[in-house]
Amino acid sequence: MGVQDVTAAASAARKRAFMRDLLRDVEALERMLDDGMVETGVSMIGAEQEVVIVDQAGLPLPIADDLIAQVDDEHVTHELGKFNLEFNLDPLPFEGDCLAVLEGQINALLAKTYAAAYARDAQVALCGILPSLAKSDLGLDNLTDKPRYHALNDVLMSMRGAPSRLSIEGADELSLKHQSVMLEACNTSFQIHFQVSPENFNRSYNFAQAAAGPCLAAACNSPLLFGRRLWHETRIALFQQSVDTRTEREDLRQIQPRVSFGTHWINDGVLEIYREDIARFKPLFHDEYDQDPLALLDQGVTPKLPNLCLHNGTVYRWNRACYGVSPNGKPHLRIENRVLPSGPTPVDEVANAAFWFGLMHGMAHEVEDVRTRMTFEDAASNFNAAARHGVEANLVWFGGTRMPARELIALHLIPLAERGLATAGVEAGKYLAIIAR
């Protein structure tokens, strides 16, 4: 998902070849799952931290290239806009003081970046959407000059065939036309990863879907866009519309957008997600990789499945299924939570992460099958209500019980997260206390 050297241009023959290679990657993953090759019984966590570069007046400053060069740390890399940066944090075992270590990593990278920014009379901000962003900041001159981003813009505009309309209604209303992918650069997220065992993937992924609404309600911090008061977490509506490849006719036919919560509980493992996304969404890129995953398996080598990862990186489920290869050479599965906003401080972000990790682990120990406790429609409705109203939302929980988000989180979910983290031996009192307050 971090590959930069990609292109949108492809002949019909190349497109057919990529689809063949993509399906071959899926076949290889199925073989690895059937043969018990995918890592099990290991709990690891990870995170990606996005930040905004601003000047002394708090306005976006497009100097990412300069800061990356000055910081000179492989953890710090580009994002879509020239005024954004991303930190790729080290994976950590889900145990002991891992949350404090995660917070320490974020602070250490921020300190380096702050120092580099200070030398340029700049600062770094953590927030879901920078309130001072203006439409004039979203020209293609501020698009990061990397093949991946230019290709993404070209292919999205080509698939739409016409300018798209952004329309969000909250306390105020915002409606405008846009002709590039740069609207997505408004969003700044804190994405967290949780490694899961393949035999428990269904349960874990469905737990992540159930937890998404309450976790988002507790974390909202993006109510403003271009001076308009919109959703409590405007990132959700903005992202879905900014990378929507559907034409107006397809929208009316209720074709699923590339950014979505999904349409149903998962029943048949990670392959169900990958096969569904391949069937529903055309590949945006058609790169050629010189490897045959099935031949590599025959040689005892773990394939990286680059075609599958490339396509998966352009389908933006709010909880994304991820395949990777661990440092020990074993393949693994992760769930990437893409729900949480950046900021407002590192300790707040880690508190939000602790809440989600705790719910994931707590439900795994106390709930056999979330599908028997609530409907998917209620989980999806919770997510949308939380995005719109934050902790003021009314949410539906197990058994169809409806209550205010504040009450659900304080009385039911924080204790569940506490029990889950305690079961994992993870020290989290400091962080869950922040959620409680």
Image (spheres, rainbow, N blue to C red):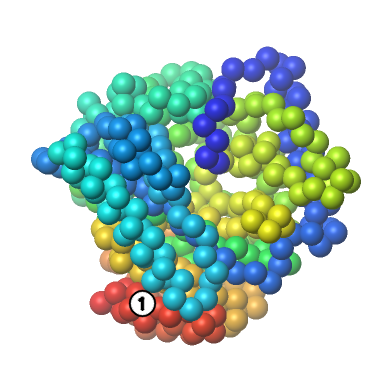
Task: Say whether residue 170 is left or right of residue 245.
Answer: left
Position of residue 356 measured from the top left corner of the image (x, y, whole percent):
46, 68
User: 222 and 313: which one is in front?
Assistant: 313
Task: Say whether residue 160 is left or right of residue 294.
Answer: left
Up the image or down, 321 lies above or below 249; here it is: below
Extreme left residue here? 57
Up the image or down, 31 lies above or below 308; here it is: below
Please state the total of marks drawn on the protein image: 1
Position of residue 335 measured from the top left corner of the image (x, y, whole percent):
57, 58
Give, as a three-letter code, the residue at label 1: Leu
Up the image or down, 86 lies above or below 352; here it is: above
Q: Which residue appears at 68% of the width and 72% of the height? A: 41
Residue located beneath label 1 in the image: 432
Extreme right residue here? 298
Extreme top residue here? 11
The reply to whether residue 36 is in sight is yes
Task: Say whether residue 244 is left or right of residue 165.
Answer: right
User: Where does the C terminus fall, quadrant-wise?
Assistant: bottom left
Q: Secondary structure at mark 1?
A: helix
Position of residue 128 measured from the top left corner of the image (x, y, whole percent):
30, 50
Q: Which residue appears at 58% of the width and 83% of the height? A: 366
User: Where does the N terminus fall, quadrant-wise?
Assistant: top right
Task: Say whether residue 369 is left or right of residue 174.
Answer: right
Other-residue count near label 1 (Cα within 10 Å), few / some / many at <14 / 14–19 / ≥20? many
The reply to whether residue 416 is in sight is no
Position of residue 260 measured from the top left corner of the image (x, y, whole percent):
51, 47
Q: Which residue appears at 67% of the width and 38% of the height? A: 306
Q: Which residue appears at 55% of the width and 69% of the height? A: 93
User: 171 and 368: which one is in front?
Assistant: 368
User: 183 and 276: which one is in front?
Assistant: 183
